Amino acid sequence: MAGLELLSDQGYRVDGRRAGELRKIQARMGVFAQADGSAYIEQGNTKALAVVYGPHEIRGSRARALPDRALVNCQYSSATFSTGERKRRPHGDRKSCEMGLQLRQTFEAAILTQLHPRSQIDIYVQVLQADGGTYAACVNAATLAVLDAGIPMRDFVCACSAGFVDGTALADLSHVEEAAGGPQLALALLPASGQIALLEMDARLHEDHLERVLEAAAQAARDVHTLLDRVVRQHRAELRGGHRLVLGAGFPAADPAHLHVGERHGLHHGGGAVCGRRPCPGFCPGLRRPPQEVGGSASGLA
Amino acid sequence: MKETPLSNCERRFLLRAIEEKKRLDGRQTYDYRNIRISFGTDYGCCIVELGKTRVLGQVSCELVSPKLNRATEGILFFNLELSQMAAPAFEPGRQSDLLVKLNRLMERCLRNSKCIDTESLCVVAGEKVWQIRVDLHLLNHDGNIIDAASIAAIVALCHFRRPDVSVQGDEVTLYTPEERDPVPLSIHHMPICVSFAFFQQGTYLLVDPNEREERVMDGLLVIAMNKHREICTIQSSGSEMQ
């Protein structure tokens, strides 16, 4: 697209953001009642849905079971209406396979698979609208879904994309910026330790600039982490109050108070089932504020 | 045939040796194996030997109609195949994960970095363009397929000559090699992949891992660069690193 400048002289991008600014992120957990864990995320105009089943027994051949760890199975699917032109995407095509492999690699690094030997964890990700940064949105949605399922993880996995235009590193690329053909970097980070789960870069970038782009992506991933953390805490506060937001259900669930989502400081309860430990403090020790009693049921502190 | 599992004592031996900065074949941590490139009789055919890993590359071309959204650009198609003679574990049904990963990496490294000028492959805009097809076959697997494959691909592309074409109005004349000399492809730069195997979350790095080292590694980092010091692709796979 000739004449479309990605970074104006005043430092504004095509959609009015600054160089290091993220798009607006909105997320919800527990959107499906049937799945063990589910989440929906919107990053600007990119919308992704993630569903987690597990840990459960290995489907298919028993021979694939790993004796000391859980098997993580990821599948990525992109809706036909997700891009500007309606495109029929066959299920097993190379790009979907590659995305699935990358997601699997990312989550095998983060999920504590040693706690569930000989079992399988399925993560299914569906992209409903693709406006750039699809890998990042998928990883963020899948992180929330895994947390919703109560599967213990080493840390949040936060991902963001970054690019480089006119000597400035841009964070969180939109489709227009990606299509312009400049270098793009996708980074998945475990924020607490600063460990990189996956790093991928396309198109030519001079090695002197790599540090800056990497730093921009890492900073953006940490910002995403702050947002996701807030979403998880809000979700728990909603559960604690007895109002469970479930798509399609008309009434709150029976006793959601003891559902411990596997936050990084709450790893003492590995599963998502009702806690059997009595007396239960009713909230994870890491939470700074005690849960608020929001009317309704008295299913609060034990 | 399923891959023979690596015994625990061999694994421990390799890891201990790496901690002491020693490699089985006597190389230093940042040493490459010897590379030998030989060419076949046709234009665009080459065999690359990286230590004992052998890759055969062949480039061919064909006139086709272009893609709808890119009417003035030629088409580049890469295909890497792991033949059964490379390793007993490579069977037609079993290789999909590794194959997808390698193929996508080759595509990203060579196509997205725009090393070939695709606009020069256009003959008649919107109707006829050249489709360049690069076929790579792995003949022997002794580690580090990706480096050998990227070298084979870029060498084959540099060696290849396509038939000359002339356009007069609506008529397209394709000249045989006897009538007019074939024309080389216009290559902007040559990206070469370098693989680093890392152990213990990045504490120990090895360049050009051979097959045994690949089995015990935690993860692999592939960086593709050209001689202008530009990075064309980075991909990390395996577990995390600092």
Image (cartoon, helix red, strand yellow):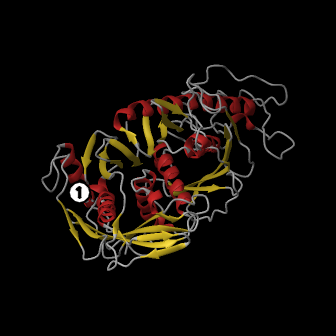
How many numbered discs, if any? 1
Residue A159 lies, with reference to residue B168, above or below; the image says above
Residue furthest right as drawn: A250
**Residue, far left:** B26
Q: Which residue is mark 1?
A: B9
What amino acid type should be assigned to the residue bearing mark 1? Cys
Q: Is residue B12 above or below residue A39?
A: below
Quarter where residue B102 is shown: bottom left
Residue B155 position in % (x across, y down):
29, 62
Q: Is residue A192 visible?
A: no
Residue drawn at point x = 59 percent, y = 26 percent? A12
Percent x, y of residue A294: 80, 25
Dot 1, how many residues are within 10 Å of its Cα: few (below 14), some (14-19), or many (20+)?
few
In the image, A129 versus A111, the foreground residue is A129
Q: Residue furthest top?
A: A289
Residue A251 in sight from this viewpoint: yes
Picture quadrant where residue A2 is located = top right
The C terminus of chain B lies in which quarter of the figure? top left
- Residue at disc 1, secondary structure: helix
Q: Residue at x 74, y 28 (%)?
A: A300
The residue most toward the front is B169
Up-down: is A89 above or below A14?
below
Residue nearer the viewer, A187 or A243: A187
Camera-side residue of A127 and A285: A127
Of all chains, the one bearing label 1 is B
Give the x, y percent position of residue A164: 47, 35
Query: Quarter holding the N terminus of chain B?
Result: bottom left
Towards the viewer: A301 or A107: A107
Snapshot quadrant of residue A176: top right
